[in-house]
Amino acid sequence: VTAQGEFSAEPMQVRFSGEDLNISSQNLTLTGAFRSEGNPQNDFRYEGEGRADGLGLLGTGERAINISAAGMNLGPLQITGRNNLVEVEGPLLFEGLGGEMLSARFAPTRIGWRGTIQAGEKADQALVTARGGLEIDVLDLNFPGDEFAAVMEELALEGELRYAGNEEGARYSGEAEAQAWRLDSQAAADSVTVAAGDRLVFGGVRMTPQELRFADIQGDNLRLQERTGQLLAAELPFTMTAGDLSLGEVSIALRKRHVHAHSLKVSGANTILVRQEDGGIDLLPQVAPSDPAREEQGRDWTFSIDQAALRAQSSLRFLDTSVSPRVDLQLDDMNITVEGLDSARPGQAGRIELESGLGRFA
């Protein structure tokens, strides 16, 4: 069977056996050429372009996925059906795409795709595999518990996304790069940007419903603890500006709510460190104070770093407010290494090595 012209369906829904994955559209229009081989496998081929409005992708069960889009432009593309497997090759442009996936929520945005998408069934479970590149205008992520919000601008991903029903959930492997980013603490009375920066490159990305892993992360112009409310520099125990970032072997356990890095290196940074009135020094990012209402929802996020280092023309201003008059010390051309940072074990002994020239002292 060969057909050439326009195909329209409203509404349309595709359900896989076991109802693990449902795909729906309020309106679908395709213009092009269609050919069916008429064999028992229902093999077919389509070449053309199209438009879909009111899209939905719903995966049920423990590892749920729920994504919607206001619209999608298709093509020019090729759609092939072979051995009960459908493959889509060509560019796709999503408008207002957002939802929930991989234990995170993301706000609607514009997303462009190029590559191939395969959809079918295996052992009565939906199986979807996408290989290619994804370009996202603004990725606005909210994590479980909503303590943090992560925003990435002009994010590009290259790799493979696989959804294998409720047996595995959604998994991603590949590389990623963002031109600007920030991580906000949403629970604080005065909102604090915990970290921000310019270009950020992720190598060796592995993403599952349980965790995210990165072989390495490289970033430009790192900034820690920016004030976005009425907080002043001296009221934040640790701030940093203008550093270049390098992280090695990073893992984010989504359910345990823990971030671990084997190594962290920052070059060319200007840092302010404050010893507070009680004599304490907090080297870890200052997030929100403890909130009993949030504690009922789940544990707080924790951070650990095996080794953190400041290198290459870095400077440190140290303010000691535990004595009167307070001490104000400037250290220049500094190399510092800190081992054993762990926010889950406050007060534990660590190790610090420091090499520096002495600047201003008051």
Image (cartoon, helix red, strand yellow):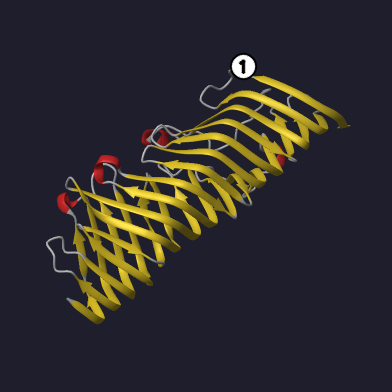
Residue 338 found in image quarter: top right
Nearest the eye: 335 or 2: 2
Using the image, determine if residue 81 lies above or below residue 335: below
* Residue 143: % across, % down: 43, 44
* Residue 167: % across, % down: 25, 40
Q: Amino acid at mark 1?
A: Ala
Residue at 44 percent across and 41 percent down: it is 206
Nearest the eye: 361 or 266: 266
Residue at 32 percent across and 63 percent down: it is 88
* Left or right, 257 with reference to 200: left
Nearest the eye: 112 or 75: 75
The quadrant in which the C terminus is found is top right
Q: Is residue 191 visible?
A: no
Mark 1 secondary-structure assignment: loop
Using the image, determine if residue 123 lies above or below residue 263: below
Residue at the farthest top position: 349
Q: Is residue 67 visible?
A: yes
Q: Which residue is mark 1?
A: 349
Nearest the eye: 166 or 349: 166
Residue 63 found in image quarter: top left
* Residue 171: % across, % down: 37, 44
Residue 166 found in image quarter: top left
